[in-house]
Amino acid sequence: MAQANQTPRKSTSMTLDGAILEEARALGINVSRAAESGVISAIRAERAKLWKQQNAGAIAEYNAYIDAGGVPLATHRKF
């Protein structure tokens, strides 16, 4: 994902609840930056969800491997 501060900014339009916008302005919150931060968080969450879906088979196989034979090199653990 491109870093927000390294790419050109683009103007967009969005609709917000009026009370939320008023409170944000009263608190001195930069609404554009806050929205950008929220979108970045949503992108990260969606990418993580997709990664888990795409790798579910491999994760299940690894978990079955651990269940069947234990953690590799477990005998060398100090804890």
Image (cartoon, rainbow, N blue to C red):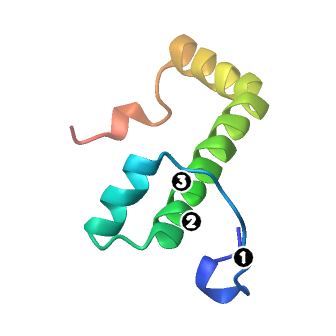
Q: Earlier in the sequence, mark 1 or mark 2?
A: 1
Q: Amino acid at mark 2?
A: Glu
Sort mark 3 into few (<14), some (14-19) or many (20+) by Cα contacts within 10 Å. few
Residue matched to label 3: 41
Asked if labels 3 and 1 touch by Cβ distance under 8 angstroms, the answer is no
- Looking at the rendered structure, the secondary structure element under dot 3 is helix
Per the model, the C-alpha gap separating discs 1 and 2 is: 11 Å
Sort mark 2 into few (<14), some (14-19) or many (20+) by Cα contacts within 10 Å. few
Q: Amino acid at mark 3?
A: Ser
Per the model, the C-alpha gap separating discs 1 and 3 is: 19 Å
- For image coordinates 70% across by 74% down, the residue present is 2
Tally of numbered tags: 3
- In the image, which disc is placed on residue 36? 2
In the rendering, at what x and y percent does residue 53 appear? 73, 29
**Residue at far top of view:** 68
Q: Residue 50 sits in which quadrant?
A: top right
Residue matched to label 1: 11
Q: Amino acid at mark 1?
A: Ser
Side of 14 relative to 57 (left or right): left
In the rendering, at what x and y percent does residue 78 appear? 23, 42
Sort mark 1 into few (<14), some (14-19) or many (20+) by Cα contacts within 10 Å. few
Side of 37 relative to 43 (left or right): left
Q: Earlier in the sequence, mark 1 or mark 3?
A: 1
